């Protein structure tokens, strides 16, 4: 749908840039190009003056001939910090050994071929720098503003790449390379627009996530609404049923009245019918009352006879029970007497056995007594015991 399509990206108006891209002049130089470099007591150089061409310039030489020194001189003259060169942390290290001071002078092409801007940076071994612009001493900030005017970015590795920072350049991610390239192109609004584009992309993603969440919430609310509609319909049905129940409650007394009225009429009709039946039954009762009285009298006579017979039966049963109890008592006494007789018999048998055993023991003792030899007392010993008078012999025989 057309409404769901993303809005087109607005076109960038070329006239909105802060400055038009630089144009080459008749001398083939672009404003801000280096037209002359002068070194004095700088690293390996005593004095050097060179004039780069308007396009590609190559510095060729053997190792240690001063190629990197020339690059360092350009960077320091363009207000670069010594740390970005990867060689030394202070400008004092760039003064030629044995000298106290040196300087770097760079001439930049101005807006016309005849206009040149000379930037001079004097350094010494005390790590001090003095800045001059066209021979006049100026603060460093003024030099930095001039360099920014020509969009010279010494800290940008895509625009200025020292030998000792090649590894850092190789470590740049594609996104960082793109950002540094945009800065080096020359349009200062390009990085800003890129950053705005990134921010808006993030905002778009956030909005897309929010839209999805809102859609999910909307679906949940729709489902909840559908459930609530069912509840609402049930509530409405309940209200209708309550109203109907209330109406039924109002009709109920009338219905009860009609039912009771109908029952009352039916009861009246039934009462009349039953009354007629009762009259007929009463007449029959009066007719049969005489035989009933006679039967009652006969019943009373039979009842009295039955009571008298029952009392005789009860007395006979009682006497029979007494005789039975006495018989049981006598049987118990007889059983006890028989048991006593048996005990006496057992005692008698036991006594006879003891008498028999005593007789046998007496006979055995008599036989043993008969077998014993006659006893003769020792006369000599008796005489001694009689004269001594100190001991008494007690002789016992069994």
Image: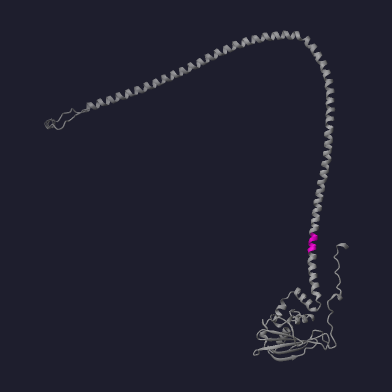
Residue occupying the point 32% across, 25% down: 357
Q: Position of residue 66 (x, y in %)?
A: 70, 88
Query: Is residue 77 positioned above or below 218 on the image?
Result: below
Magenta-drawn stretch contains 209? yes
Instruction: Give the camera-side residue of 332 and 367.
Output: 332
- Left or right of residue 307, residue 242 in this image: right
Q: Splitting the image into 4 quarters, where does residue 120 fall?
A: bottom right
Q: Which residues are magenta?
A: 206-212
- Left or right of residue 127, residue 189 in this image: right
Q: Position of residue 222 (x, y in %)?
A: 82, 53
**Residue 49 visible in rendering:** yes
Instruction: Give the camera-side residue of 214 and 325.
Output: 214
Q: Position of residue 252 (x, y in %)?
A: 83, 32
Residue occupying the point 79% across, 80% down: 149
Magenta-drawn stretch contains 67? no
Q: Position of residue 288 (x, y in %)?
A: 77, 10
Query: Is residue 214 positioned above or below 173 on the image?
Result: above
């Amino acid at each position: 749908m057309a409404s769901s399509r993303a809005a087109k990206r607005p076109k960038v108006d070329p006239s909105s840039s802060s400055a038009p891209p630089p144009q080459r002049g008749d001398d083939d130089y672009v404003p801000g190009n280096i037209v002359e470099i002068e070194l004095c007591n700088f690293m390996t150089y005593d004095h050097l003056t060179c004039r780069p061409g308007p396009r590609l310039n190559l510095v060729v030489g053997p190792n240690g001939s001063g190629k990197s020194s020339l690059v360092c001189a350009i960077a320091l003259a363009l207000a670069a910090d010594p740390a970005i060169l990867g060689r030394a942390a202070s400008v004092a290290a760039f003064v030629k050994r044995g000298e106290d001071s040196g300087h770097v002078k760079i001439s930049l092409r101005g807006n016309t071929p005849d206009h040149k801007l000379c930037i001079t940076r004097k350094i010494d071994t005390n790590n001090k720098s003095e800045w001059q612009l066209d021979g006049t001493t100026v603060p460093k900030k003024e030099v930095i503003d001039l360099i920014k005017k020509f969009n010279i970015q010494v800290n940008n590795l895509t625009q200025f790449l020292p030998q000792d920072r090649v590894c850092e350049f190789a470590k740049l991610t594609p996104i960082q390379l793109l950002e540094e390239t945009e800065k080096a192109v020359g349009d200062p609004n390009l990085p800003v627009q890129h950053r705005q584009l990134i921010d808006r992309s993030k905002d778009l993603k956030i909005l897309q996530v929010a839209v999805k969440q809102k859609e999910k919430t909307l679906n949940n609310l729709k489902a909840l609404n559908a459930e609530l509609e069912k509840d609402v319909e049930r509530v409405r049905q309940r209200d209708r049923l309550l109203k109907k129940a209330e109406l039924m409650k109002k009709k109920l007394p009338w219905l009860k009245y009609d039912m009771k009225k109908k029952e009352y009429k039916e009861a009246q009709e039934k009462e009349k019918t039953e009354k007629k039946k009762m009259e007929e039954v009463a007449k029959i009762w009066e007719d049969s009352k005489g035989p009933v009285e006679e039967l009652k009298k006969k019943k009373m006579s039979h009842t009295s006879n039955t009571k008298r017979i029952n009392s005789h039966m009860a007395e006979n049963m009682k006497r029979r029970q007494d005789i039975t109890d006495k018989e049981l008592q006598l049987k118990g006494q007889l059983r006890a007497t028989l048991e006593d007789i048996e005990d006496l018999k057992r005692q008698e048998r036991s006594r006879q056995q003891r008498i028999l055993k005593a007789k046998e023991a007496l006979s055995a003792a008599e036989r043993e007594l008969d077998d014993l030899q006659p006893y003769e007392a020792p006369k000599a010993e008796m005489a001694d015991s009689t004269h001594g008078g100190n001991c008494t012999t007690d002789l016992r025989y069994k």
